[in-house]
Image (spheres, coloured by chain):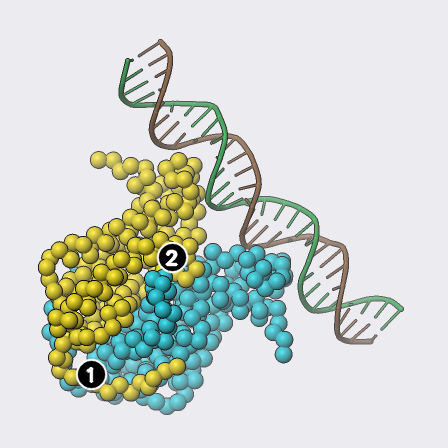
Chain colours: A cyan, B yellow, C brown, D green
Amino acid sequence: MAETTPDRILDAALRTFGTVGFSATSLDALAVQLGIRKQTILYWFPSKQAVVDAVIDNAAAELIEVFESEASTGRTGLAQVEAIVRRVFRLAVARPELLGLVREVTRPGSRSTERLRSHAAPLFERAKDYLEREMDAGRIRRSEPSMLLLSIYATVLGVATEFEAQQALGMDDDLRGAVARRQELIRFLHAALTPDPTEARPESTSEQIG
Amino acid sequence: MAETTPDRILDAALRTFGTVGFSATSLDALAVQLGIRKQTILYWFPSKQAVVDAVIDNAAAELIEVFESEASTGRTGLAQVEAIVRRVFRLAVARPELLGLVREVTRPGSRSTERLRSHAAPLFERAKDYLEREMDAGRIRRSEPSMLLLSIYATVLGVATEFEAQQALGMDDDLRGAVARRQELIRFLHAALTPDPTEARPESTSEQIG
DNA sequence: GCCTCCGTCTACCAACTGGTAGAGAAATGT
DNA sequence: ACATTTCTCTACCAGTTGGTAGACGGAGGC
């Protein structure tokens, strides 16, 4: 089954946008990559922005799929959270360009902020509702759900960040190692969220900053 | 004391590069911001790349200053690590564009990878040496120093990531909150690295991924 | 008063950007 | 066999990009 031209365009665009960014990617460069003319891209998409939007929509759909399929397992509490995080990790290993795209879209100056918001906001609300329900049920330690979500998000995205730093520093090409280390952090997160903790959180020597 | 033109250029460039990125920033846009013509920028810097390089060098010098001044306090163990992390956090609050620049430079497709490496590698080696010494002295729990450093790096950079996501989602503009939450994570890190831990790390329900 | 140097300017340039118009090839339907 | 539709192409275009050449004006030295 031959991949259609628009599909090939979106594939290449996701890869390139996710690594070098939107504005650093010209339609020409994209076309050369595919062995076609840029006018062919503009035949399938009315503008470059339309390509960007389509790539974002596709990626969002793929990520939402992960949440949907995990939400339907009937798991509860932290097991559910961990299952989703683990799936996202796996996706990050298999398709690092997806995380690159997320980083590109969440950039302050991005023109796609509105689009991102329309995809992410409902997901965020659902996750918040879930956490609130589970906190009410006593399965997750009570805290501010949106803060917790942001922390989880930042931790997950840390994989990509860390991996890139590793490559920039010329270290071994070891995303799996980065993932394993990140899981270590997730375990700390887990420890902090489990109800009836062993109260082993040490007195930190760090004072309040600001 | 009037700021010189090249200084003003570097200031504006850091701010813009750190938010919208290198390639999305034109010399013209930079010049308009400063109320000058782009040719004036090219009078002070031989090329755009030279501006980029100078901005990176400046930022690197500023960051290295933080490490240097903290290294000379004679602190040891985790107190030293925490002091540096705290300083970097403070810098992140005061100058978010610095972290934006780091993200821009560590991007896989970046042309500045070599320059980044030349700045970061020696710092990284020194930090590794420090950690190894402190592990030998029993003041930090033994683990792989470079892995530990990468985790710390990712955690610190998470502040920026989280803050940007927050803004993209249209939440309250609260970097300080993000920093506080991040410090919570740092405390977990602290717990995991303190020698003779209380062994309170829970059995995680997460299985090995891959 | 004049000269020189410094900093910014106007006026260009070639290359590249996203985008348009329309020709031509290759299937497809009838 | 022909007409139509689908797709990619060549040939453009105007605006923007980083970069060059050289004029202009002001400050200081003499």
Quarter of the figure with the C terminus of chain A = bottom left
Q: Residue at x 15, y 75 (%)?
A: B194
Front residue (pair A108, B41): B41
Q: Residue at x 27, y 57 (%)?
A: B122
In the rendered image, residue B166, in percent from the top left (x then y), is placed at 32, 66
* Chain containing mark 2: B
* Chain containing mark 1: B
Q: Quadrant of residue C18?
A: bottom right
* Residue A162 as seen in the image, left or right of residue A55: left
Question: Mark 1 is on which residue type?
Answer: Arg
Quarter of the figure with the N terminus of chain A = bottom right
Say which mark, if any, is on residue B201. Answer: 1
In the rendered image, residue B190, in percent from the top left (x then y), is placed at 17, 73
Q: Quadrant of residue B6?
A: top left
Front residue (pair D30, B181): D30
Q: Kindly report which numbered mark, 2 or 1, lies closer to the viewer in this rendering.
A: 2
Q: Quadrant of residue B163?
A: bottom left
Front residue (pair B132, A158): B132
**Earlier-in-chain disc, 2 versus 1:** 2
In the rendered image, residue A14, in percent from the top left (x then y), is placed at 49, 67
Element marked by disc 2: helix
Q: Report if residue A55 is visible in the image.
A: yes
Q: Residues within 10 Å of mark 1 (few under 14, many from 20)?
A: some
Element marked by disc 1: loop
Could you tell me how many numbered marks the image carries? 2
Relative to residue C2, is residue B102 depicted above or below?
below
Relative to residue B88, is residue A6 depicted above or below?
below
Q: Which residue is mark 2?
A: B113
